[in-house]
Amino acid sequence: MVFAFIALAVAEVVLVLMMPGINYAGADGKAAQAEILITLEFARPFDITNLNPLQGLGSQLMPMNVWVNPAYWPFAFLDKELASEISGIAAFLCYSAACYAMARCFDLPRIPSIITAQLSIVLFGPAVRALGFVPSFASIPGLAVVYAPHLLAFGLLAKVSPERPQVLLIAGGLLGLLFYSVYCDPLWTMVSGLAWIMPFAVVTFSPLDRDTILARCAVLGGCAAALLLSGALEYVYSLSQYTARVQFADLDRSRLPEYTSVLFRSQFASYFYGSCALGWVLGILLLRGRPRILALTGAASGLSFFMYACAYMYSAGHWWLPIPIYIEHTLFPLFWTAAIAGYWGALQALAARARRWLYPRISDLGFPLGRCCPDSKRI
């Protein structure tokens, strides 16, 4: 596992060296870079918001907490160009580790979990630019650190069970992850949180066991109560009501297909979704336990995203929710993790069938079964 992550980091470093200047590129990236430098120089350390009443009716600064996000720390010690590249690599490593941990929480073996982590490279520069996917993590790599706690919280929720004595510890970890995401960036954590509503709901009610459902509902309810009593939810809601999308509702952007899905932006998106859909079907048919729940969650989330995108394109009136392409970008790791689980289940089924076919033939040949077929006891 350690070797796999080292190889993954080396691959990202090589890509960054071959194509420098990808991270924090474009208008959004430069604005985020400027805000990081301004915050480090003028803001109060560990303050959760950069907004100030003295700035008047509006502010160009987002509530970005650079003090607790490790992707932004290089800007405090290095020059801007080098810090930009290291920031992207640090965010990539945090996000890939979260993908690996999420897969392991659903009882996926190490090999498919490592593959899941390695696929996260497609969301970071320069790979995301070459594939034509949404370059959110290339423009602002620190967003990956904001989104990563939701991946881990999703995996921890699947571990909640009334038979587990560590349920309180898991609940505390889940609450800490949600608090950290809000503390890092309360504005963008709303986008990620909205995207994960359906996956959390599916895992909460799967399997249809009363005690398990009650335990998971209790954990989520406790987290929601803690966030509400602490004032975090009130702050996040108030922040959302003072965005330009709400205050200037009449200036709604055109609802173009490019804002709906990467299917209208990238020539590789159709292959991605085709392979994911096949993996989901295989996982639902062949897997059992938590891996099957993961495959089912991927399929249900894909369907819910399709309905969300249709509502965006064809509903009348002002659209104040995040545009669908941001929701899709957030759910990408769930989509490919669920598909990998399905393909791994298919490989295991083929291997089991092959062993059953070889077992009687090896026995008929008179070879010692234990020596020629070491997995014979599992058949």
Image (cartoon, rainbow, N blue to C red):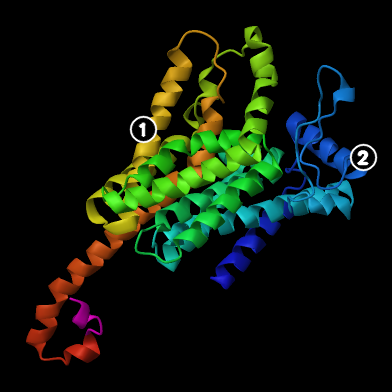
9 in the magenta segment? no
Q: Quadrant of the C terminus?
A: bottom left
Q: Nearer the viewer, residue 12 or 28?
A: 28
Task: Specify the amino acid type for callout 1.
Answer: Leu
Would residue 376 be counted in the magenta stretch?
A: yes
Q: Secondary structure at mark 1?
A: helix
- Which picture quadrant has residue 240? top right
In this rendered view, identify the residue nearer to me: 8 or 188.
188
Which residue is located at x 48 percent, y 18 percent?
A: 312
Q: Is residue 73 visible?
A: yes
Question: Going 64% across and 45% down the picture, which residue do you hit?
Answer: 181
Quickly name the residue at label 2: 42
In the image, 129 versus 109, the foreground residue is 109
Q: Residue furthest front?
A: 229
From which residue to which does the magenta span run?
373-379
Q: Residue at x 66, y 63 (%)?
A: 10
